[in-house]
């Protein structure tokens, strides 16, 4: 933080998070602005009462961050990238953070495709890091597909172009697994229904829909 400014990384209950645990970055101190001009609702949502210093306020940045062991702050992504999947609220930045702990993964990005499935893009080993993620995250946070890239697409501002990733995410789930055609009329009828519902080119006998 710059002079006259303080940083806090807090959980949803406005409690400080331990080292390595993701939370939202909050800004306080004498350098804090009064609010958004002519936007009282947004000001009320973003500028909150300070949970530790009565009479002062904190600004909710919407940035998902975590402390490193050297006390530096690691930016993980935006909270407004949050998605809801099968009743669970998921921060793609949390999944990316765990992926980046893999010793061979250099860059990573996680997006949700049009079929409401998580797809992980990464730069690193030829093998999928699925097992690594499974050892560190609950099942509902494990992406349906892992796609290895030589480079992540970037915006003119040198940020990951998530819109470009979403444009190809629809085919990534099918591309990762071997296709096994329906083996009888019943499977063919069920596959046709899922193909129409999910709006995908094909559905195989062993495809999962979770």
Image (cartoon, rainbow, N blue to C red):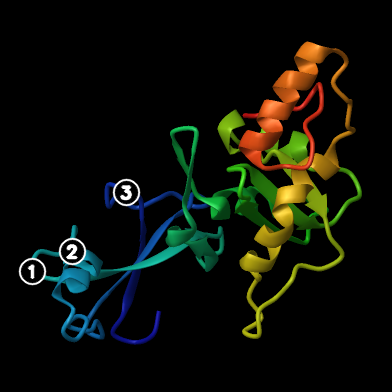
Q: Are marks 2 and 1 in contact (CB under 8 Å)?
A: yes
Query: Looking at the image, which is closer to me, 151 or 182?
Result: 182
Left/right placement of residue 137 relative to residue 180 reads left
Q: Is mark 1 on a helix, strand or loop?
A: loop
In the image, residue 9 lies at what x, y percent? 38, 60
Q: How far apart are marks 1 and 3 (CA)?
A: 21 Å
In the rendered structure, find residue 141 and report the number of the disc placed on it: none
Q: What element carries label 3?
A: loop
In the image, residue 144 lies at what x, y percent? 70, 38
Q: Is mark 2 on a helix, strand or loop?
A: loop
Q: Distance between the residues labelled 2 and 1?
A: 7 Å
Q: Earlier in the sequence, mark 2 or mark 1?
A: 2
Residue furthest out toward the left: 55
105 relative to 54, above or below: above
Q: Earlier in the sequence, mark 2 or mark 3?
A: 3
Left/right placement of residue 114 relative to residue 65 reads right
- The crowding category of the residue bearing disc 3, from other C-alpha atoms within 10 Å (few below 14, some 14 to 19, many at least 20), is few
The residue located at (50%, 60%) in the rendering is: 67
In the rendered structure, find residue 12 and report the number of the disc placed on it: 3
Q: Quadrant of residue 105?
A: bottom right
Q: Quadrant of residue 117?
A: top right
Q: Looking at the rendering, in which quadrant would you find the C terminus? A: top right
1 vs 3, front mark: 3
- The crowding category of the residue bearing disc 2, from other C-alpha atoms within 10 Å (few below 14, some 14 to 19, many at least 20), is some
Query: Looking at the image, which is closer to me, 166 or 183?
Result: 183
Residue at image mark 2: 50
73 relative to 100, above or below: below
Query: Looking at the image, which is closer to me, 159 or 196?
Result: 196
The residue located at (76%, 67%) in the rendering is: 152
Q: Distance between the residues labelled 2 and 3?
A: 14 Å
In the rendered structure, find residue 55 and report the number of the disc placed on it: 1
Q: Quadrant of residue 56?
A: bottom left
């Amino acid at each position: 933080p710059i002079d006259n400014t303080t940083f806090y990384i807090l959980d949803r209950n406005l409690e400080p998070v331990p080292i390595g645990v993701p939370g939202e970055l909050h800004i306080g101190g004498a350098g804090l602005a009064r609010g958004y001009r002519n936007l009282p609702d947004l000001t009320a949502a973003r500028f909150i009462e300070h949970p530790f210093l009565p009479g002062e306020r904190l600004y909710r940045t919407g940035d998902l961050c975590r402390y490193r062991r050297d006390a530096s702050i690691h930016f993980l992504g935006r909270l407004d990238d949050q998605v809801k999947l099968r009743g669970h609220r998921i921060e793609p930045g949390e999944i990316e953070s765990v992926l980046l702990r893999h010793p061979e993964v250099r860059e990573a990005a996680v997006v949700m495709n049009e079929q409401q499935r998580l797809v992980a893009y990464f730069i690193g080993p030829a093998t999928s890091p699925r097992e690594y993620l499974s050892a560190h995250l609950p099942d509902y946070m494990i992406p349906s597909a892992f796609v290895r890239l030589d480079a992540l697409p970037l915006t003119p501002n040198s940020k990951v172009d998530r819109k470009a990733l979403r444009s190809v995410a629809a085919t990534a789930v099918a591309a990762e697994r071997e296709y096994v055609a329906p083996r009888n009329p019943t499977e063919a009828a069920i596959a046709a229904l899922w193909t129409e519902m999910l709006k995908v080119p094909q559905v195989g006998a062993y495809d999962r829909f979770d």
